[in-house]
Image (cartoon, rainbow, N blue to C red):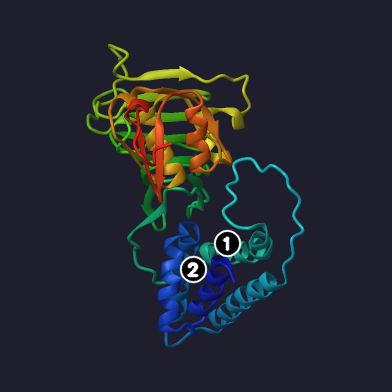
Amino acid sequence: MDSNDKIWILMSRSLSGEISAEEESELAALLESHPDLNQQYFMLKKLWNKSFTSANIPEEEKDERALFKKIINKAETERRNATEIFEEKPEPLLIRLFSKRLLFAYAASIAAVLIFFITRPVQNIEQQPEQLITAHNGSRSKILLPDGTTVWLNGGSKIYYDYEFSGPLREVRLDGEAFFDVAKIKDRPFIVHAGKIDIKVHGTAFNVKYYQDDKNIETTLLHGKIEVSDNTNKEKPSIFLVPNQKLIIPAERSVSAKAPSKKAYELLNLDTKLEEKERIEIAWIYNRMEFRGESFEDLARKLERWYNVTITFEDDAVKSLMFNGSFEKETAEQAFSALQKVAAFNFKIQGREIFIKSPDQVTSGIK
């Protein structure tokens, strides 16, 4: 039994109150490595506990609880009986986080549970704390926010948001990289806080890249309209982006709409001749890492998040090597071997650590 099979069985037992203490610990460990399922489980468990723990449960809620458990149990039965009947078809903006067999078994039943219990009126639920969803290095995750907005998280990313999105503004905080397909809700703007900038949107699709160890904050708009403002100085005018534009802001500087120099920000136009899936800014959504004219030092940060490794440069000279290319299905060793074909350096892999040196500093064990 693989981890995906196990996690659904334990989730079912936990929600129905039949899980042991040992199984509860095992479930917690599995959910830690599956942030997308962790979100679904958290939401379901909260609604379950708040709705059904009263001593005097109304008859209609007893029926709902029975239906809920029936759906969960049906999903587990379908999982056991599911067979591989999928055809390979490209799915735009879909991160295949689960095996095809599990997707077939659970898609309809879990979606039904989520829609039913998230949209139904629930009485006496106090305000929930801020939620955190994490995509660990080496992974990419797809999540659904309570308002219907879909978010894709790149490796090494975190997103924080209010559990119910209950206020006049829908606000999230981002540390890392995310693609947002925002559900349009009249009079309830969607705002992304990313470091020193705030991005105000309505119904739109855009990418935001804000890693704290990167030099720049990048925002790429595909559809709709967004407004970017400096949250360190509210008096500065906002920058408005139209579709197929990319905004690059140095992370250590405040954003300025007057742009007295190129150092304040850059506003670039995307190549509209390219299909969306071919654009380097969102290639990661299609499980492809693209890089153009990047130094080895900058590229190393991407490689660390992509492969869940730690990269150490053992001399400074090799950091300035420049690279263009892309990786999709390559292993870490294959990726570094490919880079070696266009630049001179040596590397050594020890577990999840990769050591890089200039070729004139060859030592035993260095490739």
Q: Amino acid at mark 1?
A: Ile
Q: Where is residue 28 drawn, in percent x and y?
A: 41, 70
Q: Is residue 335 above or below residue 132?
A: above
Quadrant location, the C terminus: top left
Left or right: where does residue 257 sit relative to residue 81? left
| Residue with the mark numbered 2 | 44
- Identify which residue, 367 or 329, lies in the foreground: 367
| Residue with the mark numbered 1 | 115
Left or right: where does residue 123 sit relative to residue 211? right
Q: Where is residue 303 drawn, in percent x and y?
A: 43, 38
Q: Where is residue 104 drawn, in percent x and y?
A: 69, 61
Between disc 2 and disc 1, the foreground one is 2
Q: Which mark is residue 200?
A: none
Q: Is residue 228 above or below residue 186?
A: above
Quadrant location, the N terminus: bottom right
* Residue lying at 54% horizontally and 79% vertically, measured from the top left: 61
Residue 222 seen: no
